[in-house]
């Protein structure tokens, strides 16, 4: 062995930020790993000495708002498990995960054998990261009325360069523009220094919304993977990009202008920027699934309870895994 070869340090850049800022709402978090001996999930806060390293020349990422609704939940869970089994992503970023959905994931053999899970769950539903790699996890809470935050998983490339994966769910409802803009600015403050960053989540707005101004201003060094993927096929018209990349379920669009609220953005250092490429990109979860009669009856009762009859009817008509579609991509670093 050549002892003159410099070994990577795998030094966390986010840990430095957390320690220096000392903010109560920005902290390093635990993760969970499944112990087959005890058949329980246990703390995995050992990443200082056992960092997560991207050892392959590619990285696959799945992003999905799985919807907190109980509508057709059993069938939606089964379809989602089939989907993630098929896609076999290295990193899974989920939004609107309920306690019930989280427990379902933790009971799945596929998850137990292959992933660690961020241990940052709060409230009735939250964001969640599942990672095949070991990782440092960090949380920054937003200014929010809905308990929103960003989770950051910090892994490393083989040369010791940090790679950050951020998963978030920006404030919901059309009128919450100010919140979403401030949340984007906060994310920018965290990721403007690191050189290699993936941001995946439910932005809750589309390129036609005023929040896009913040994207243009603060995230100019990031690339929208769907846009790049479509441009490779010669599609550059914004309307066509939005329509073909729709991630808001058609049945839910009547109350939402945002037809492509879910995005994956990336930026890489100058060396990686010369060679990285998108090998695959797909909008997933569009296939219709079975709806149980019991769930149809439940939704009829729900329609009677809420004021907005149109929204209730649209929810009852959702025949897919979620009221959103998901995203799946594979990035090559060759």
Image (spheres, rainbow, N blue to C red):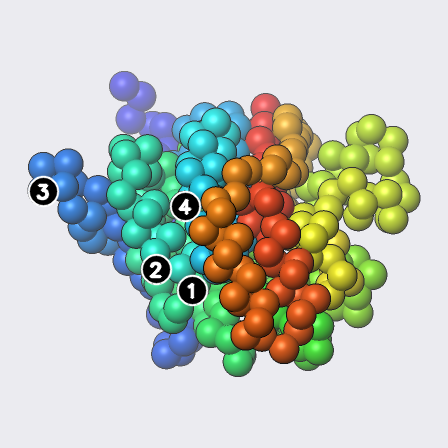
Identify the residue under disc 1.
125
Q: Which of 306 and 99 lies nearest the eye of the viewer?
A: 306
Q: Which mark is residue 74?
A: 4
**Residue at disc 1, secondary structure:** strand
**Residue at disc 4, secondary structure:** helix
* Residue 35 vertical position relative to residue 263 in the rendered view, above or below: above
Earlier along the polypeptide chain: callout 4 or callout 1?
Answer: 4
Earlier along the polypeptide chain: callout 2 or callout 1?
Answer: 2
In the rendered image, residue 148, in percent from the top left (x then y), is placed at: 50, 70
**Label 1 near label 2: C-beta < 8 Å?**
yes
Identify the residue under disc 2.
99
Residue in the picture at 62% in, 65% down: 312
* Residue 142 vertical position relative to residue 49 in the rendered view, above or below: below
In the rendered image, residue 51, in percent from the top left (x then y), is placed at: 32, 43
* Residue 165 vertical position relative to residue 126 in the rendered view, above or below: above
Residue in the picture at 71% in, 78% down: 175
**Label 3 near label 4: C-beta < 8 Å?**
no
Q: Work out whether residue 271 can be spotted.
A: no
């Amino acid at each position: 062995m050549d002892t003159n070869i410099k070994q990577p340090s795998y030094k966390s850049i986010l840990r430095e930020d957390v320690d220096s800022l000392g903010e109560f709402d920005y902290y390093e978090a635990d993760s969970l790993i499944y112990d087959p001996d005890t058949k329980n999930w246990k703390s995995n806060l050992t990443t200082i000495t056992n960092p997560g390293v991207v050892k392959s020349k590619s990285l696959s990422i799945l992003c999905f708002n799985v919807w907190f609704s109980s509508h057709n939940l059993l069938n939606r869970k089964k379809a989602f498990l089939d989907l993630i089994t098929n896609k076999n992503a290295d990193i899974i970023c989920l939004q609107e995960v309920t306690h019930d959905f989280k427990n379902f994931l933790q009971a799945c053999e596929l998850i137990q054998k292959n992933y660690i899970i961020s241990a940052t769950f709060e409230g009735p539903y939250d964001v969640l990261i599942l990672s095949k790699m070991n990782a440092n996890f960090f949380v920054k809470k937003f200014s929010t009325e809905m308990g929103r935050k960003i989770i950051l998983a910090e892994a490393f490339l083989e040369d010791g360069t940090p790679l950050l994966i951020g998963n978030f769910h920006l404030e919901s409802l059309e009128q919450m523009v100010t919140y979403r803009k401030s949340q984007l600015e906060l994310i920018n403050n965290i990721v403007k220094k690191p050189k290699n960053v993936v941001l995946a989540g439910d932005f809750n707005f589309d390129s036609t919304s005023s929040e896009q101004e913040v994207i243009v201003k603060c995230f100019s060094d990031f690339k929208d993977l769907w846009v790049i993927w479509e441009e490779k096929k010669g599609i550059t018209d914004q309307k066509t990009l939005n329509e073909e990349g729709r991630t808001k379920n058609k049945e839910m669009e009547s109350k939402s202008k945002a037809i492509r609220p879910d995005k994956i953005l990336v930026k890489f250092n100058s060396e990686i920027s010369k060679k990285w490429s998108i090998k695959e990109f797909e909008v997933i979860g569009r296939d219709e699934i079975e709806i149980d009669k019991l769930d149809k009856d439940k939704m009829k009762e729900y329609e009677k309870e809420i004021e907005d009859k149109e929204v209730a009817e649209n929810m009852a008509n959702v025949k897919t895994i979620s009221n959103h579609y998901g995203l799946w991509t594979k990035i090559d670093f060759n």
